[in-house]
């Protein structure tokens, strides 16, 4: 077993996902065994004690000045593509800044493929994982710890433990910005990240489609409830321009994210078109901000990165 595998197993995590216990909150069985009345009462008392402690105290990630989370209420809206190109755009706009990219989408990590990275992270002398580096961006992802085609079949508590390790057991060195690619939705991972580390701001990604906007609104409202500043919305796949006749078509609707931003009192950070080059660049592991920096699509990401920085509060450290 490799050193990184031993690291992952600390605290009971298993890459196989088999034999996981049922979470205790509200459950009356553990690992398939029915609880007695006394045991169930003890568990209920324990859960009450944990809940009475309130929210966990936020602790900064060592060496990281500011954390920017990229989130969406729904999958398939281009969140990971936006996170990758935002990280590269932050670096391109100011080469003096050190940028990191953290993928906390445990079930569907995309960063390894998009950043053209493979392999297992090495461990430092302090037993912390060292990020993998490409295009000048330090990257960490669950995808580095499991086989590319292997599903992560884990229950909620195991996922939370993995996220905790990705947050606390990575040697980032010194970063000006850490871009966090969140999983879609408003579940345990989003809540855990928001409550455990200070976040400078959240970027919400959505297409203009009504169905996507419904969930994007839930995502924005969630961050507000946990007191994370929402920097604004990115309207992705905003328009398609035919490469032959140049006719523009709003496949997913026109300006839906702009209308939502007005309702929520937020800003639109920018529009990203639906373009073949963006998809091809992501699939080949050469993000468009890196591979085609002079293209209109790359410039759109560069403008969004500038808007994000302009809205960030002063760093805490």
Image (cartoon, helix red, strand yellow):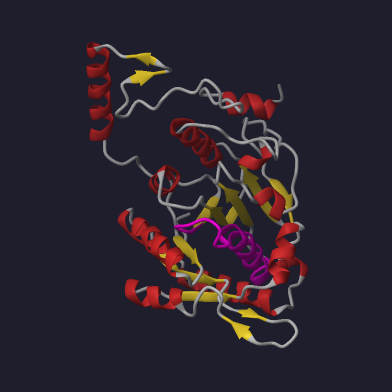
Can residue 313 be seen here? no
Nearest the viewer among 58 and 37 is 37
Nearest the viewer among 99 and 254 is 254
Residue occupying the point 49% across, 53% down? 184
Q: Position of residue 165 (x, y in %)?
A: 53, 35
Total labels: the figure holds 0
Residue occupying the point 60% across, 64% down? 86
Q: Is residue 104 above or below residue 123?
A: below
Q: Is residue 304 above or below residue 285?
A: below
Residue occupying the point 62% across, 85% down? 248
Q: Position of residue 151 (x, y in %)?
A: 62, 36
Residue 86 within the segment the image draws in magenta: yes
Q: Position of residue 28 (x, y in %)?
A: 31, 21
Q: Position of residue 234 (x, y in %)?
A: 51, 70
Q: In screen coordinates, is 243 left or right of 236?
A: right
Residue 226 within the segment the image draws in magenta: no
Can residue 245 be seen here? yes
Stretch of the chain drawn in magenta: 70-95
Q: Quadrant of the N terminus?
A: top right
Q: In screen coordinates, is 49 left or right of 302?
A: left
Residue occupying the point 59% across, 45% down? 108
Q: Quadrant of residue 81?
A: bottom right
């Amino acid at each position: 077993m490799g050193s990184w595998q031993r690291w992952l197993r600390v605290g009971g995590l298993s890459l196989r996902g088999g034999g996981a216990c049922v979470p205790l909150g509200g459950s009356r069985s553990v690992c398939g065994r029915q609880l007695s009345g006394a045991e169930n009462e003890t568990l209920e008392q324990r859960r009450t004690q944990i809940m009475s402690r309130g929210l966990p105290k936020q602790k900064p990630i060592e060496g990281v000045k500011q954390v920017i989370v990229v989130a969406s209420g729904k999958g398939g809206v281009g969140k990971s593509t936006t996170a990758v190109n935002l990280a590269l755009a932050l670096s391109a706009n100011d080469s003096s800044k050190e940028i990191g990219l953290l993928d906390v989408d445990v079930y569907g990590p995309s960063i390894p493929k998009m950043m053209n990275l493979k392999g297992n992270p090495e461990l430092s002398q302090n037993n912390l994982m060292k990020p993998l580096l490409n295009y000048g961006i330090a990257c960490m992802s669950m995808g580095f710890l499991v086989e590319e085609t292997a599903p992560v079949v884990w229950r909620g508590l195991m996922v939370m433990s993995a996220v905790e390790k990705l947050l606390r057991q990575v040697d980032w060195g010194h970063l000006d910005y850490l871009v966090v690619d969140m999983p879609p939705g408003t579940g345990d991972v989003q809540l855990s990240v928001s409550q455990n580390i200070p976040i400078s701001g959240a970027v919400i990604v959505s297409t203009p489609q009504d169905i996507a906007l419904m969930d994007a609104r839930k995502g924005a409202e969630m961050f507000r409830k946990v007191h994370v500043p929402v920097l604004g919305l990115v309207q992705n796949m905003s328009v398609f321009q035919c490469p032959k006749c140049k006719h523009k078509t709003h496949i997913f609707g026109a300006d839906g994210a702009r209308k939502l931003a007005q309702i929520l009192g937020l800003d639109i950070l920018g529009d990203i078109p639906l373009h073949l080059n963006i998809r091809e660049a992501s699939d080949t592991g050469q993000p468009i901000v890196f591979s085609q920096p002079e293209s209109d699509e790359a410039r759109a990401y560069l403008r969004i990165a500038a808007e994000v920085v302009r809205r960030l509060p002063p760093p805490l450290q």
